[in-house]
Image (cartoon, rainbow, N blue to C red):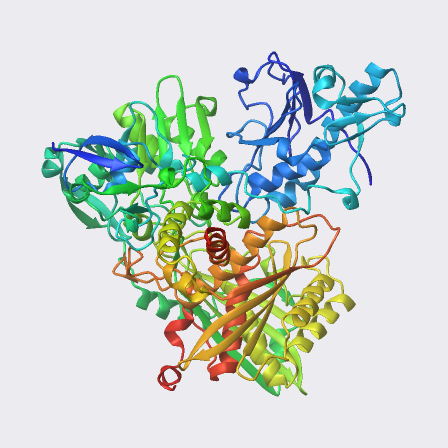
Amino acid sequence: MKDTFSRRSFLKTSALASGGMLIGFNLFNACKSDVKMPVDLSSLNYKDFNAYIKISPEGKVTIYSVNPEIGQGVKTSMPMIIAEELDVAWDDVYVVQAPLDTENFSGQVAGGSQSIRRSWQPLRETGATAKQMLINAAAARWGVDAKTCSAKEAVIYNANGDTLGYGDVVEAAAILDVPEEVTLKDPNDFTIIGKGKGNVDMDKIITGKPLFGLDYKEEGMVYASVLRPPAFGQMLESYDASKAKELPGVIDVITIGEKARTLLSEGKPNWSVKLSTTDKVVVIGKTTWDVIKGKKEITATWKTDSDLESTEDHDEKLLSLLHGKKFRTRRKDGNVKKAFANADKVLERVYESTFLPHNTMEPMNFFANVTEDKVHLVGPTQTPEAAEGAVASMLGRPVEDIHVDLTRMGGGFGRRLYNDYVLEAAEISDAIKKPVKMVSTREDDMATGVYRPASKYKISASIKDGKLTGYHLKEACINGNMYGLIPNFFPAGAIENYQVDSVRLKSNISVGAWRAPYTNFLASAEQSFFDELAEELGIDRVQLHMDLLDNVKKNPDANIEYSPERLQGVLKKVVEVSNWGKTADDVYQGLSVYYCHNTHVAEVADVIMENGFPVVKKVTCAIDCGIVVNPLGAMNQAKGGVLDGIGHALYADFSFKDGVPSVNNFNGYQLIRMAQTPKVDVHFIESDVAPTGLGEPTLPPVGAAVANAIYKATGNRLTKFPYAKYINVEEKIIG
Amino acid sequence: MPTFNLKINGKTHTVETDADTPLLWVLRDHINLVGTKFGCGIGQCGACTVHIDGNATRSCLLQVSQIEDAAITTIEGLSEDGSHPVQQAWKEIDVPQCGYCQSGQIMTASAFLNENPNPTNNDIRNAMNGNICRCASYNSIEEAVKVASEKLS
């Protein structure tokens, strides 16, 4: 595979004063022409490039990993791509997390399962370029044509049988021109990509070394715990901190909020997240326990600033919107109205889901040290660039003053896209002039968080002469909505008369992205509906999908993002490997097929009845994500997504009463546990197509696979999350 | 403020703190052993699991005044170099995703296997049920505990 591209715009190399070579690259933006590479690592300011490969004279390779690591595995898989093309032994590679570079980089984000998809080509080119420069340096030393030389596992060979190690020529290579043209490997020759590589932080994780934001400490650092209003819609009126201040470990009690309020009122935050602008009481103390204890001793009074909302009211208003007329049309094909008017039969169902907290295992926290010279921020964020910008704006400082170091994150799931907790840490440090670690408790996280919005769907299908003629999906959702390409996902393009409409209900509850935003419930609704539709039409469930996807192939549509061939591919695969339709009589199977985040997935859930209650025993999953970069990491993502999806579909219950969340810790909120987990059997479609992400795509379809299997087992159609709450009680008693 | 002498990973540490301070925060903030994690603070998630005289115990609920005479083992003391069979099994199966809950999972698994070196799959599923993994790496944890049991026997 030959690949030609202009290198000069985004690659720079430098000889290191300490020996060795440093190659820097910029994934998405061209470097500024006056950018110079640093001459030794101690002067590396990370402002010029996004990532670096460092090669020492001994041939050891350090790869600086760019993107935030939230458990999706990019700290292992992205450096694997560089190492493959650089052609070094993976065991000789040392991976280091790079801090934020805001000047030249626009993609240092963990979100949307996009890291691998967007960086695949640039990472390969970077590794290949470094390799070519090392070959060129060796060829020059030998006085031979570089075209007659090759390299493998950090050793360069020429036609005469001479060899040189990368380390032998690294200093000469560093001062060569960057080649205009390099050759990328044939995927058949990959020795790292496609081979399972363990998590690069494994040894630290299993021995308990400091890795996460909560583990970060600095000399002189104090701790802070923030008291926020107990209900959405409330603001701080007054407080009494006298008892808290008597505690020996409490240093001070202050309020913050003014600076964040000014920033938030300027409309800086993310699309759907409306964060509270209240003042907050902050307990500063010597240890985490001191501030947790201190906060309990604060007596605060709160005033009502806007409505104190309840789930009951939300449900009523959302249903009213869903049955009303105030919609924005997102996609319209043919004439749905006419199709429904002419229908012999209309199938219509309403699907409902709750708010969901993210519940990252590592609660929100951040370190901030605001000084006159600079602002140092350290901790877990999926959007470090946004954090830097927000803190700079809030404190009235140039972004050059802000330095963000990234820690490994104890989960993200979308919660750490929103930097409210980073702003709090910075505002506290600015107020007390000390390095501080803001630490949230589980209760803080679950009850004063950002949530997946509650949403409802009404899906209708028109049937004429035994055929599906029209499909109309309506969405009513709190604050946020489906947008952009989502209405162009399956079944868009497959049905002649097709329409998607959405409407929003405004609320003062903070909502935002939650793992697989937009589709995490939508897929369950649609794929449950198709199961019922197939039954109504008297068509085999698999055949209905194959036929609909054939329609897409016959009528190509430029707006359709999914590939009908690849969806059919995963469907066929899952039918084959799940033993679909051929299981024992007491095993009930449910199917779901979905495309999101650029990846195609089909899943079959096997349910059996145990003591009269349906239990998911196995989920078979077929995935087409193109080339699988790291099979070990990919398997972990796929299985984790499936089990996470089952847990939240079956058990996660979260509501509001007068603005206050119904639960605030794991004693009242059920996350899936091991005894509830089925075995997940994952099959990847063999492919040489460029890879797409896996952090999210296996989650959305599984709810419907489970619901469809439970229907077969119990005759009960489930349409509301959490399913376990609505499984027919009579069925529970039988047996 | 009272002082307490704690035997942690074979060494005695003297800490000065309130008698009601949970062992979790003594480990993390006073002694700098941050491998033991904070997850819920109410004994529901298992991220803070340590061994007290060999038994898996939630350190977030255990007050420092209750454990002066006990032998406390944290993830940092399970082995000197990560060579405990449970740690090795975790590595072999590549269990962690985000990794945050895994020290608690390993501490629960290692105490359990000490008691029951030849567990059935159901024994494993019940023993590990108190530890939440938000990334849902449960299939891999289950497999790793099995592998560890084979290493131990």
Seen in the picture, residue A507 relative to A375 is either above or below; the reply is below
Residue that appears at 54% across and 47% down = B92
Q: Quadrant of residue A12?
A: top right
Residue that appears at 48% across and 35% down = A384
Front residue (pair A249, A696): A249
Residue that appears at 67% across and 68% down = A571
Q: In the image, residue B94 lies at what x, y percent?
A: 53, 48
Quadrant location of the N terminus of chain A? top right
Front residue (pair B127, A181): B127
Q: Can residue A525 be seen in this snapshot?
A: no
Seen in the picture, residue A608 relative to A500 is either above or below; the reply is below
Quadrant location of the C terminus of chain A? bottom left
Seen in the picture, residue A584 relative to A8 is either above or below; the reply is below
Q: In the image, residue A324 lies at what x, y percent?
A: 45, 71
* Outermost residue toward the top in this view: A17
* Outermost residue toward the front in this view: B153
Q: Is residue A116 left or right of residue B99?
A: right
